[in-house]
Amino acid sequence: MASSIVDLVILAGGRGSRLGGQDKAALVVGGRSLVERLLQDVDLGGVVVVVGHTPLPPLPDGRTVLQTLEDPPDGGPVAGIAAGLDALDGISAPRTPVDPAPAGGLDVADRPDVPVGPKVGDRGWVAVAAVDQPEAARALALLAAELPYVDEEVEAVSPVDSTGHRQWLLAVYRRDALTRALEALPDVRDTSVRRLVSGLHWQDVTMDPQHLGDVDTWQDVEDWARRVAHDDVTGSC
């Protein structure tokens, strides 16, 4: 089966209260920032949108990353998802180099008008990932590999952690299903992700629980630094 082209929305606007207000996307784990790990370690074939004004690193292979922010800002992850999908609307997948904006991303207002590759609307899947998950790139690659095999009624695919909690912010969604769920909300600001997506038809993907989890404290930063260093040495995936 042919692999699926998947757009990616990275939620990078969070600042951890238990990290002294630190920009989570800029946290360094294993020698690279969290946003750098995501951008450099996974390519799902589609357009990437970073929701948040964190500085972006140089991009590999001439890929273009759009950068946007919900308006007004600080509206929570559901507002971030809505802003990311808005940024994707009408954009074509650029597969040739485009000069990046000074921060490393292409502001939505400056996005190229020349269509290159299939339109976003022609592709059925969009991944959503919170930037504070150091191993999100590995998980996204595994999820994308499952897409050609899912049943037509499946609307979202994600791992489930060791406690049985579904990873809503590390998942791949049918774009039309996610759009309908957003449109059904009275307001996307300050709305729980559970309310947005719990009614979708999900499929679980089994993966190593060592690759799941996020960063909320400085102890988490230290623990993840050791974990990713071990994975880099052993080639664990």
Image (cartoon, helix red, strand yellow):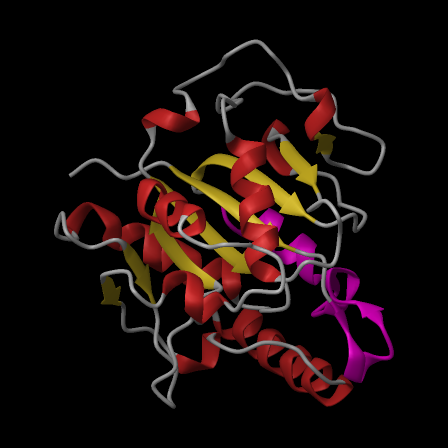
Q: Which residue lies at the image location 68% right of the left edge and 85% below the top edge?
A: 220
Residue drawn at x 64%, y 16% is 112
- Residue 58 in percent (x, y) is at 74, 39
Decide whether residue 30 is among the magenta residues.
Answer: yes
Q: Quadrant of the N terminus?
A: top left
Q: Please indicate, yes or no, whether residue 206 appears anywhere in the rendered image.
A: yes
Position in image of residue 120 (x %, y %):
42, 27
| Magenta stretch contains residue 198 | no
Q: Which residue is rendered at x = 27% and y = 73% of the image?
A: 206
Q: Quadrant of residue 25?
A: bottom right
Q: Vertical placement of 98 versus 221: above or below?
A: above
Q: What is the quadrant of residue 199 in the picture? A: bottom left
> What residue range appears in magenta?
15-43
For this orientation, the residue located farthest to the front is: 186
The answer to whether residue 237 is visible is no
Identify the residue at image location x=73%, y=30%: 107
Q: How many labels does the image show?
A: 0
Residue 142 in the figure: left or right of residue 106: left
Front residue of 7/194: it is 194
Which image quarter is the C terminus in? bottom left
Q: Where is residue 6 in the image (x, y as percent from the top left)?
A: 39, 40
Instruction: Pick out the residue farthest to the top.
Output: 114
Note whether 206 is above or below 23 in the view shown: below
Q: Position of 73 compared to 205: left or right?
A: right
Q: Which of 229 and 144 is in front in this view?
A: 144
Q: Position of residue 183 (x, y in %)?
A: 43, 46
Q: State whether residue 86 is above or below residue 201.
A: above
* Position of residue 144 in the picture relative to residue 45 (left or right): left
Vertical side of 32 occupied by 147: above or below: above
